[in-house]
Image: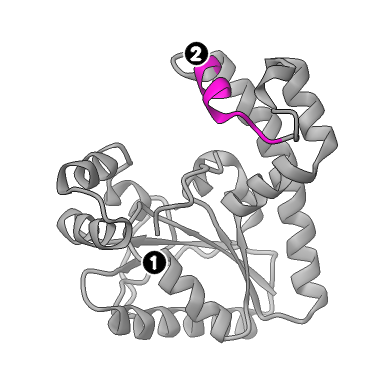
Amino acid sequence: MIVIGITGPTGAGKTTVLNVLRDMGGGVADCDAVYHELLRTSVSMQHELKERFGGEIFDENGGLRRRELGAIVFGDQTALAELNAITHRYILAELERLIAQAEAEGRPAMALDAAALLESGAGALCDTAIAVTARTDVRVERIMAREGISEDYARARTAAQKPSAWYEERCAHTLRSDGTREELERQARALFEQILNKEDQSGHGRKGKDAGTAAAGGTAEPEGERLGHSGRGR
């Protein structure tokens, strides 16, 4: 089984790409969903967060008070780094469990969906990574349609994220989704088939990292590779 990291800015089409892999029998781990589930169920992670940031960051029902936690870490890089150090450790452990489960189920691939795949350490769990990107104007239109927000707010959202080139330079493969959903689905399927066929031929499985890059059309071209909790953007 091969583990594939999927990353990219909001509105680029990551959900469409992940759904293609699901249809091909692959597994998907949404790192944002994993984080929120751990906040709800992991007593150990809750305890560490309370020890560092105070019990008031959780309400009487055990739910995280995001505003209170945000007030502590906003503008304090040390506090933010400590928050990430705690949460990332638990997220990575859960991802390793989910990868092992997918392999035991006989799935051909497992995708890790993370907005900050490369910054968080989750990229080290992957055999290869795909950047899903699109032009800014395309992403703005998609975000406006998806969330019913103004153009100014959508542009502010995109401006707050790293540019597409940052992801493309750091991932082994790139899918550019400036066209229709159907075009992206065809391109994603072709790229997944290429990755899976390469694994079958090499027999490396999880032993070697993929160094090649494919453009959305399926042609290879030489390019470069927080579990961010920004799972809204796809």
As drawn, is 162 to the left or to the right of 54? left
In the depicted structure, whether residue 192 falls above or below residue 159: below
- Element on which disc 1 rests: loop
Q: What residue is drawn where x is 61% and y is 30%?
A: 84
Q: Position of residue 93 (x, y in %)?
A: 77, 47
Q: Position of residue 177 (x, y in %)?
A: 28, 69
Q: Answer with mark 1 or mark 2, whichever residue precedes in sequence.
A: 2
Query: Would you identify the image quadrant in which residue 54 lies?
Result: top right
Instruction: Identify the mark at residue 76; answer none if there is no mark.
Output: 2
Q: Amino acid at mark 1?
A: Thr
Dot 1 corresponds to which residue? Answer: 213
Describe residue 211's horizontal placement relative to residue 51 as left or right: left
Q: Secondary structure at mark 2?
A: loop
- Magenta span: 63-72
Which of 4 and 91 lies nearest the eye of the viewer?
Answer: 91
Q: Residue at x 77, y 82 (%)?
A: 106
**Residue 208 visible in the displayed image:** yes
Q: Main secondary structure of the magenta part?
A: helix
Placement of the N terminus among the 4 image quadrants: bottom right
Classify 10 Å Cα crowding around label 2: few (below 14), some (14-19), many (20 and above): few
Residue in view at x 61 percent, y 78 percent = 199
> Of the residues tagged 1 and 2, which is closer to the observer?
2
Residue 42 on image: x %, y %: 80, 41
Identify the amino acid type marked 2.
Asp
Q: What percent of the width, then of the height, locates residue 186?
A: 36, 86
| Left or right: 128 in relation to 136 | right
Q: Residues within 10 Å of mark 1 (few under 14, many from 20)?
A: many
